[in-house]
Image (cartoon, coloured by chain):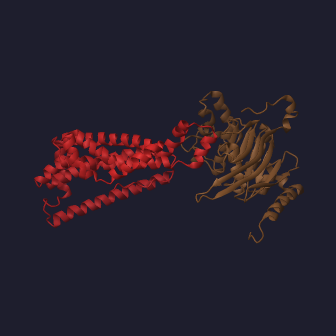
Chain colours: A red, B brown
Amino acid sequence: MNHKLANQLSARIQVIALAIVLVALWEAICRIGHVSPLVVPAPSGVAVRLYTLLSDGTMWPHLLVTLTEVLIGFAVGIASGLVVGALISLVPVIEKLVYPYLVALQTVPKVAVAPLLVIWFGYGLTSKVVITALICFFPILVSVISGFHSTDRDQLDMMKAYGATTWQTLLRLRIPSALVLIFAGLEIASVLAVIGTIVGEFVGAQAGLGYLIMNYNFNLDITGVFAVLIILSAIGMILHGITRFAGRRYIFWIRREQPAVMPH
Amino acid sequence: MLTSPVTETDRPAIASRALITIENVEKKFATHSGEVVTALAKVNLDIKENEFVSVVGPSGCGKTTLLRILAGLTSVTSGTVKCDGEILRGPRSDVGIVFQQALLLPWNTVLDNVLLSPHLKNDRSEATRWRAERWLDFMGLADFGRKYPFELSGGMQQRVAICRALMREPKVLLMDEPFGALDAMTRESLNVELMRVCSEEKKTVLFITHSIPEAVLLGDRVVVMSPRPGRISEIIDVDIARPRSLKTMADTRFGEICDRIRTIFGSEAPTGASL
């Protein structure tokens, strides 16, 4: 047990060491090569900028807006994905009727629809929530459907032989079995959530980190763009981390090391 | 439809009364290509109360189909199955099943797995819980109630599955190659444990296996089945006194019965079959 912990710790240290080496290399190239901060800013410059943005209060209102959009959008995406997925999995008529349309809808690039959604739902919170929810919806939907289909047939027989009702089988067997795949879908969606919100803010917004990036980019303030990017990836990583942690907590019976789910 | 009521004169001796009656049971399946396969052809079998019946046969002889029919998981194409005088129409609450895989619910503790049947009936009483703990204790799993199935070995998981079946207080215990996936040592110890349960609890058991010695060691009778179409080729009485133990396997009589079953399989093998 201790040995395992030590191994994990040393792996963490290695990852951090690699990051330090890479950042140092980046700093060195910028300084030695006299790279213009209009192209690639040095990490030190980005760090200073990030500190100022956070300490002078410029960043916080935008961060709050984006965070609200991401969280509400993610929540709506989860809720709708779970409900629609469960309906499709458990009511065969709905699966036959609705699923083809959902697949057709899925092939439409959500990013391309974003301008429409901004026109329909305005420049405020609603349009970003809708875009985020839409982008999160499909991976969750697919994971719920495949989750429910993954129930072991022998287990279903066992429940039947033990006299379980359809409802009891659902609660005691099918939902817990589905959780394994559902959490994989949630992990993918957690990363997509941030992308969805930023896309929405790029298309049209008056506040938010995406709006801030557009603004800095317009003013050729590349150091500012990098600073915001760091905050954005931090949000993504924290959201992903929480989802993953919740998943491991919930589906503790899967003992094998879960492969990291890479967002596309 | 009610079957004829069981009167006192119908059952002179309870011990020898047929608890399960299988009459002319036939089961046909349609395969994906539309071909009809006869899994069971005209099977007749009476299982008496408190009797231990082993079923042996090669794969494809319909032994699992027979068990699934008795479990109420599969319907018959023709013929009737009666359990305790009633025609069988689905899973019964007085039948316990143990499958080849333990099929425990991985998200529930061992104790909750054993309590599955009472929980499904909303029985969460202290007395029931105590009974479950006693079964675990009886099976040598007293300290494992709070563990999860993945923390247990295959043999222990199968013991839990047996406890779960026994919690239904079944009259009939159906076992489908329950020890087939276990190593030989674990298998033998579980055979001994099963004999202990049956001698203390008076159960009627249908035990499916592909091991001839296991069938003879455990069974009062051994039903020998053969494939294509699945049917009973012979029923052999195991006239070896109980209690039996692993030492019974060294008896001359034990060897004779095993040999006789092997001869049946040998004579039934199609000519030219390479085995």
Identified at 63% across, 28% down, the residue is B126
Residue B138: percent from left, percent from top: 71, 39
Identified at 58% across, 58% down, the residue is B32
Residue B44: percent from left, percent from top: 79, 48
Q: Nearer the viewer, residue B198 or B264?
A: B264
Q: Is residue A247 above or below residue B92?
A: below
Identified at 49% across, 49% down, the residue is A149
Residue B18: percent from left, percent from top: 81, 39
Q: Tell me the quarter of the image containing the N terminus of chain B.
A: top right
Q: Is residue B11 above or below residue A249?
A: above
Q: Dividing the picture into quarters, in which one does residue B270 lie?
A: bottom right
Q: Nearer the viewer, residue B182 or A128?
A: A128
Q: Extreme left residue here?
A: A219
User: Can see residue B245?
Assistant: no
Identified at 83% across, 37% down, the residue is B17
Q: Tell me the quarter of the image containing the C terminus of chain B.
A: bottom right
* Left or right: residue A102 compared with residue B220: left
Q: Nearer the viewer, residue B111 or A72?
A: A72
* Left or right: residue B241 compared with residue B83: right
Residue B272: percent from left, percent from top: 76, 72
User: Can see residue B250?
Assistant: yes
